[in-house]
Amino acid sequence: MLLAFPKCGNNQLSRERALHPLARRTLVALRPASASKHSQPDRLEGGFGDVRAPVWSRRPCYARGVELRADDLAAYARLAAPDRPDAVDRMRGEFERGERRFADVFVARALGGELTAALRAAPAGPATVVLAGPFGDDDAAARLVPEALARARELGARLVRIRPRAAQLGPRFRAALLGHGFRELGERIEFKTPVAELPLDDGRTLAEVGGDAAAEMLARAAAGDPRGDDENDDPRAAIAEFLGAPALTHGPDCVQVGYLDGRPVAFVCAQVQPTDGWARITYMGVVPEERGRGLGAWVHRRGFRILRDQGGQLYHGGTAAANAPMLRLFRAHKCRETERMFEFEWVAAR
Ligand SMILES: CC(C)(COP(=O)(O)OP(=O)(O)OC[C@H]1O[C@@H](n2cnc3c(N)ncnc32)[C@H](O)[C@@H]1OP(=O)(O)O)[C@@H](O)C(=O)NCCC(=O)NCCS
């Protein structure tokens, strides 16, 4: 796919909340461990020994995935961002401003009510939703997949993407994704580096061009990308998606085409989040016939220049582990590897 990188209902009453807590607990407690082919027992956490209960039955009286409640925020932040002490305050602000919605976050609970897993649907474009997570217990998170996918579809998603970190991705979650129509694209490696430390290009030969020229160059330059070679992709729509990402810069200077001896040979789109300086090279590529001559390095550095000119502070990039030349560029430019993750996507039937 050409459409790279991340970017968001109604606040329906969750099924769990619709049920009186006492009734819910009684139903859970009375249900025998493996009474029905519909029940999918979970091991209970905290003080129940080896007791198993069908907390996740598909029967409507049990909640498989329930929405996050305002009073869960601190527990959710610990689950989703354990290494970020400021996460609760940051997330509270995002929920208050409507940048995150409770209806988009699905959580699993142990019998005592504590959160055990979470998965969030985050709109990333007009028809793209990114699932953030999974956070927490592998088995519990796996059971949130259908809820989150249904929410993504409700939000209009034709494409749903998820990139679990290697350490977060358990066998049950992977199986749940595959079982619900996601396909696995492979491993991805991510890098982060302060923009001030990145080298810049010397030349000035990349030009801001109109939509058609940029779209044509994107289509040609994406050929051979392990993730960007889908001939059904519409490059104009891809550029519109890039520039439609909420909170990122989207002016004409974000998309540039590189010329060599007057011939267009390269594409780069680079964007910055002005509020905090987070910066990405949304996409870059060189036409196949000109690769291997050092142009990729030049285009990457041109991307760095765009980021710096737009106030970028922290460059965050990544590529498929199978994309050897792009990985060499990250490493040649001293970008620091921060994460290994696996990419999955779900595409709506045409
Ligand atoms: C990634 C891409 C932009 C690199 O462009 P390029 O012009 O070939 O890049 P360079 O010539 O500057 O080469 C970059 C490095 O990769 C190496 N390289 C080139 N082709 C390679 C290959 N097939 N396998 C392994 N390494 C390769 C080069 O030797 C160079 O490394 P070095 O400097 O250590 O010698 C180009 O391959 C491309 O457009 N691919 C399709 C689009 C794409 O994948 N974009 C990135 C999406 S995240």
Image (spheres, rainbow, N blue to C red):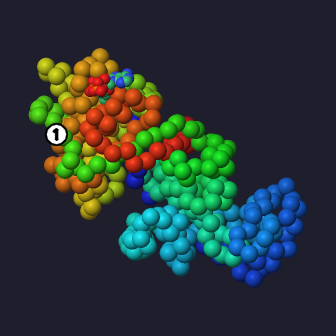
Q: In this view of the protein, which residue sits in the foreground, 217 or 212?
A: 217
Q: Position of residue 120 (x, y in %)?
A: 52, 60
Quarter of the rendering containing residue 135 = bottom right
Q: In this view of the protein, which residue sits in the foreground, 338 or 154?
A: 338
Residue extending furthest top? 289
- Residue 212 in view: no
Q: Which residue is mark 1?
A: 200
Q: In this view of the protein, which residue sits in the foreground, 247 or 92?
A: 92
Quarter of the render that holds ligand 1: top left
| Image point (22%, 49%), residue name | 195
- The quadrant of the picture occupied by the C terminus is top right
| Image point (23%, 24%), residue name | 294
- The quadrant of the picture occupied by the N terminus is top left
Q: Position of residue 244 (x, y in %)?
A: 33, 50
| Image point (15%, 49%), residue name | 309
Query: Amino acid under label 1?
Result: Leu
Q: Is 54 left, or right, of 139 in this rendering?
A: right
- Residue 260 in view: yes
| Image point (52%, 36%), residue name | 186
Q: Position of residue 253 (x, y in %)?
A: 18, 43
